[in-house]
Image: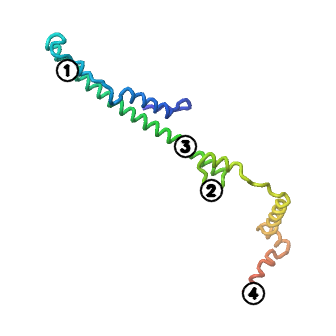
Amino acid sequence: MRFVTGPDYQVSPAALGAAAAGIEAVAEPGADRGVVALGPVPGDVGHAGLSSVFLVFCDRWEWGVREAVGRGADLASDLRAAADAYGLVDRDGADLLARLVYDVVGDPAEAGDTWADVAAAALPDREMPEWGAVGAEWADTARDLADHTWPALIARALAGENPFAGQLDDLRPIVE
């Protein structure tokens, strides 16, 4: 079995619903589709043999119409189920994409399930930091890296300095 796929393949839940409605309109339960009433009264259509064969034909035709209407109703039901399924997938897919985008741009402490949440998170009410404070933080970070990382401690020890001086003073009362 080959499936139809590709960028040009689209399913419209509205079109599926319209097709189901059309089938239901044709196969409306109250519609008079009886052909048995067409059956002749004996003697109306030639001789008795022809009349009886025509009555059998009308009876079989009636059953065929009933079967066609039943299958039409089943087809309409299946079309409505497919329309509902495609509608759910479209909505759930859009919601999933909104949640994924929110996870990228939104606040990790909150849940964003809609595109409105994404839009609100994409333009947060944040102020720019004061650049002097940012510069001071970077200077502190550079000083910490230069003074307290293993390469800096090794370099200070090789220069003859005790790199742990002052850091172990808190342990002196325990040892003494």
Quadrant for the N terminus in the image: top left
State which mark lies toward you, 1 or 3.
Answer: 1
According to the picture, the residue beneath numbered tag 4 turns out to be 173
Q: Measuring from the top left, give residue 77's x and y in whole percent.
A: 39, 35
Sooner in the amino-acid sequence: mark 4 or mark 1: 1
Sooner in the amino-acid sequence: mark 3 or mark 2: 3
Cα distance between the residues tagged 1 and 3: 55 Å
Cα distance between the residues tagged 3 and 2: 20 Å
Circle 1 packing at 10 Å, graded few (<14), some (14-19), many (20+), is: some
According to the picture, the residue beneath numbered tag 3 turns out to be 93
Cα distance between the residues tagged 3 and 4: 65 Å
Quarter assignment of residue 170: bottom right
Q: Report whether 89 appears left or right of 31.
A: right
According to the picture, the residue beneath numbered tag 1 turns out to be 56
Identify the amino acid type marked 3: Gly
Residue 154 appears in the rendering = no
Identify the amino acid type marked 2: Glu
Circle 3 packing at 10 Å, graded few (<14), some (14-19), many (20+), is: few
At 24% across and 21% down in the image, what residue appears?
37
State which mark lies toward you, 3 or 2.
Answer: 2
Please say if the residues under marks 1 and 2 sit with CB atoms less than 8 Å apart.
no
Determine whether the residue tagged by mark 4 lies in a helix, strand or loop: helix
Q: Measuring from the top left, give residue 98's x and y in whole percent.
A: 60, 46
Cα distance between the residues tagged 1 and 2: 72 Å
According to the picture, the residue beneath numbered tag 2 turns out to be 110
